[in-house]
Amino acid sequence: MTRLIDGKAISAQIKEELKEQVEAMKADGQSVCLAVIQVGDDPASSIYVRNKKKACAYIGIQSLSYELKETTTQEELLELVEKLNQDENVHGILVQLPLPSHIDEDAIVKAIIPEKDVDGFHPESIGKMVIGEDGFESCTPAGVIQLLKRSGIEITGKECVVVGRSNNVGKPMGLLLLRENGTVTIAHSKTKNLKEVTKRADILIVAMGKPKYITSEYIKDGAVVIDVGMHRDSENKLCGDVDFEDVKDKVSAITPVPGGVGPMTIAMLMCNCVKAASK
Ligand code: NAP
């Protein structure tokens, strides 16, 4: 029987735990505040920002909203980040990506001080993840680990294959699986015989940005499949990088899209905000 890994339910559970934690912190006189910056009005970014602010409100985290014009210069954005870096009442800073093409994303990510880097994108956060020091983990891969753990799926000793090596998803995903004692392979667009590699996986994590690319031919019988991909298909319905209908009878457990990894990313962002304020 295939098990559906319910990201909506697991993220709701995490948010409940955080809500209690924030209430206790407030009773001790400690607030939690996230600054959310959006440049321009890209519709997808606006939805993500809205959902993040909604999650903050539910948990009891104060969110400060900065909606900047598309024409905002890099210097103006850096100035705002610097102001928020200095503001003791702000615990986390989130700059919604992507930024307009005239702004160097890398420069902005590096300008956020590591203590407030709740997205976990700063080189110091990544470095801490590599050497196993306590820091902020990238939200999507951290969410995948929580999905596996809270579903009772053992990672230790398992063949884990990650398809995708982006800085924000694939690479940190590989690192976190390694930390959990998985035997990790990271595949990418230059990997030869992808099917042979993915068929070795007990746990297959797909973050390649290619709608419904992974079919049953890529999967070992009984594998656990986590689909990070997020797209709209020809009928404007959300779908992932995995062809869910084609693989669902071959796997032992799988995340749906929507309702799998997506809600976990926001839950882990909330975890990082609470952690930032607790420090
Ligand atoms: P990305 O930066 O475009 O990276 C895609 C990766 O997939 C690259 O490393 C690329 O390899 C690899 N790849 C592409 N085609 C391949 C192929 N045919 N065979 C093997 N590898 C291939 O994407 P991303 O930011 O990591 O995001 C991946 C997906 O996850 C997207 O659909 C995105 O929308 C989704 N996402 C979802 C969430 C969420 O919260 N649910 C969060 C973040 C991202 P090369 O490095 O060799 O080019």
Image (cartoon, rainbow, N blue to C red):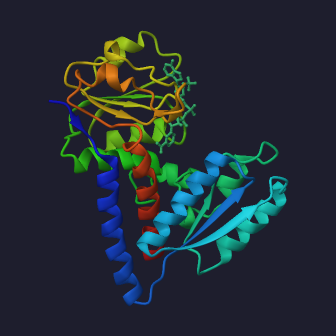
Give the residue displayed 22% in from the left and 46% down from the top: 151
Left or right: 225, with 129 as reference point: left
* Residue 97 visible to an observer of this rendering: no
Point out the image quarter for the C terminus: bottom left
- At 33% across and 48% down in the image, what residue appears? 7
Farthest-out residue, left? 1
| Residue 179: percent from left, percent from top | 32, 44
| 196 over 101 or under it: above or below | above
User: In the picture shown, does residue 253 fall above or below 106?
Assistant: above
Which residue is at 33% across, 23% downward?
Answer: 245
Residue 70 is at least partly visible in this image: yes
Residue at 38 percent of width and 49 percent of height: 143
Locate residue 244 relative to residue 102 in the image: left or right: left
Q: Quadrant of residue 181?
A: top left
Q: Position of residue 104 (x, y in %)?
A: 76, 47
Relative image position of residue 213 (x, y in whole percent)? 45, 20
Position of 41 with respect to 33 (left or right) is right
Q: Nearer the viewer, residue 233 or 161?
A: 233
Give the residue at the far front of this rendering. 235
Residue 27 in percent (x, y) is at 37, 89
Quadrant where the image shows the N terminus: top left
